[in-house]
Image: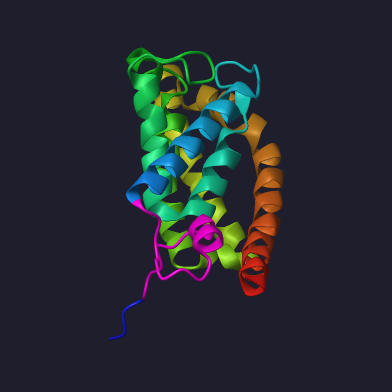
């Protein structure tokens, strides 16, 4: 039985390392990448439309892109760092921070980011980000995971009908457009990286 060979080398590593004998970032460079991705999650949380009780932000798109471009290890670490900062009270979430925030109406979506980054990042490590169809399918899975977690927690707090009407329906069309845009961009990024590497 043939095993699937995984490549934990992200597009960032491919671009920066080029034809170096090193296959992966050093620990220091990985930490910097994780910190940058975590900052992008914070930034995407603050770009929002104030809906109740779940704001419309750019975070789902940021999570999908980070996971597909950076792979499982870096994306999971970045999302974990982001959640940890919020949990200890740093106002990194859309409306603040603190442990009670994670137990509130939007907490399920935040935990969904972590589960989605694990799944999407794993698929990215298997090369799914390099093809349009697989990119769309991988990120669609990610969105389903995010909204399943979000609607589940919101339904516990407010009821299932409320969760569907206020935690799912307002976001479906916009997030599908974002998903399609991201899926079109991702393979082009990989092509650009390979072209740049050939020039060096």
Q: Is residue 132 left or right of residue 96?
A: right
The N terminus lies in which quarter of the figure?
Answer: bottom left
Q: Is residue 10 magenta?
A: yes
Query: Relative to 75, is 85 above or below?
Result: above
Residue 91 appears in the rendering: yes
Residue at 50% in and 37% down: 36
Q: Which residues are magenta?
A: 5-26
Q: Is residue 121 left or right of residue 177?
A: left
Residue 114 appears in the rendering: no
> Could you say which is closer to the camera, residue 50 or residue 128?
128
Residue farthest toward the bottom in the current orientation of the protein: 1
Could you say where residue 16 lies in the image, as x and y percent from the top left?
53, 58
Residue at 53% in and 59% down: 11
Query: Relative to 110, is 2 above or below?
Result: below
> Could you say which is closer to the camera, residue 127 or residue 163?
127
Q: Is residue 55 magenta?
A: no
The C terminus lies in which quarter of the figure?
Answer: bottom right
Q: Is residue 48 left or right of residue 106?
A: right
Residue 50 is drawn in which quadrant? top right
Could you say where residue 124 lies in the image, as x and y percent from the top left?
48, 60
Residue at 66% in and 30% down: 170
Could you say where residue 100 lies in the image, as x and y percent from the top left?
35, 13
Color scheme of the displayed model:
rainbow
> Which secondary structure dominates the residues rendered in magenta?
loop
Query: Relative to 158, is 21 above or below?
Result: below
Could you say where residue 65 lies in the image, as x and y percent from the top left?
57, 48
Residue farthest toward the left in the current orientation of the protein: 1
Tally of marks: 0
Query: Relative to 157, is 21 above or below?
Result: below
């Amino acid at each position: 039985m043939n095993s699937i060979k995984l490549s934990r080398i992200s597009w960032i590593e491919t671009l920066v390392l080029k034809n170096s004998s090193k296959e992966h970032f050093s620990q220091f460079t990985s930490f910097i990448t994780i910190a940058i991705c975590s900052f992008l999650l914070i930034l995407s949380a603050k770009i929002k439309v104030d809906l109740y009780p779940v704001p419309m932000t750019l975070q789902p798109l940021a999570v999908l892109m980070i996971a597909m471009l950076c792979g499982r290890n870096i994306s999971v670490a970045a999302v974990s760092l982001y959640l940890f900062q919020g949990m200890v009270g740093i106002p990194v979430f859309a409306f603040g921070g603190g442990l009670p925030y994670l137990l509130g109406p939007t907490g399920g979506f935040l935990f969904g980011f972590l589960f989605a980054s694990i799944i999407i990042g794993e698929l990215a490590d298997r090369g799914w980000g390099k093809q349009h169809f697989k990119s769309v399918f991988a990120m669609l899975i990610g969105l389903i995971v995010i909204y399943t977690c979000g609607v589940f927690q919101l339904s516990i707090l407010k009821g299932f009908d409320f969760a569907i009407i206020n935690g799912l329906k307002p976001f479906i069309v916009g997030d599908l457009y974002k998903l399609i845009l991201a899926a079109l961009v991702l393979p082009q990024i990989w092509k650009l990286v390979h072209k740049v590497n050939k020039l060096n």
